[in-house]
Image (cartoon, grey):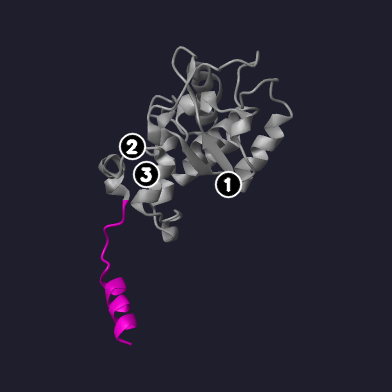
Amino acid sequence: MDIPTRQEVKGILAEATGRWRPLLMVAAFCGLRALELRGLRWVDIEAANIHVRQRADRFNQIGPPKSEAGFRTVPLPSPVAAALDAWRKECPKGDLVFPNGSGNVERLSNIVQRGYNPAQVVAGVTNKDGKAKYGMHALRHFFASWLINRPADGGLGLPLKTVQERMGHSSVAITGDVYSHLFPRGDDSAELAAGVNSILG
């Protein structure tokens, strides 16, 4: 599994321009799937939350999320909300947050080829051939790793159940199977001793 580092994501977002920056911010910090990003409506965004209620499939047809768990509410960090507010003033008229120039569903290929990949290349996030290093889904993996990693490592340190809900997985087992390797497994002897001592006084 290829997961962008914090510095790589920072570089990509710094080089993303126009509508691509808020879109990539939502992908990285809210964990929406590409299908969900393309189907996201302004009515689904509140001051502090994004409600995932629909998606746009590969044929640009609007429909429900891929599973019941896909219907979810994801916290919206204030810097991302600010970027969305700024983008809304320039966004083509219509219901969608990230439409094409005509206000219709944007193609995933356009998002990748016109926004995501160029930002990676300019930021130096490339493979040995000088091409963009990551696919779009890598930002979702980054989001999961950010949720899971300990605060000392720059993450949020959230429990597995919360990660499952924010990712929109249909079960905890799926989240565990995909991301179990990210949960800390270091020596916790010091924490255990401290915990026992706090009980025994």
Looking at the rendered image, the quarter that the N terminus falls into is top left
Count the numbered circles shown.
Answer: 3
**Which residue shows up at 40% across the image and 57% down it?**
150
What amino acid type should be assigned to the residue bearing mark 1? Pro
- Position of residue 6 measured from the top left corner of the image (x, y, whole percent): 47, 46
User: For the residues marked 3 and 1, what is the alpha-carbon distance in whole angstroms?
Assistant: 18 Å
Q: Which residues are magenta?
A: 183-201
Residue 79's place in the image compared with 103, above or below, is below
> Is residue 133 in sight in this rendering?
no
Q: Which one is in front, 77 or 51? A: 51
Looking at the rendered image, the quarter that the C terminus falls into is bottom left
Residue position marked by numbered label 3 in the rendering: 164
What amino acid type should be assigned to the residue bearing mark 3? Gln
- Check the image and name the residue furthest to the right: 89
Task: Examine the image and state in which quarter residue 175 appears.
Answer: top left
User: For the residues marked 3 and 2, what is the alpha-carbon distance in whole angstroms?
Assistant: 8 Å
**Which residue shows up at 27% across the image and 77% down it?**
193
> Is residue 104 in sight in this rendering?
yes
* Mark identifier at residue 77: 1
**Which residue shows up at 48% across the image and 24% down it?**
55
Q: Is residue 104 left or right of residue 37?
A: right
Q: Is residue 53 left or right of residue 134?
A: right
What amino acid type should be assigned to the residue bearing mark 2? Ser
Badge 1 crowding class, 10 Å Cα cut-off, few under 14, some 14 to 19, many 20 or more, is some
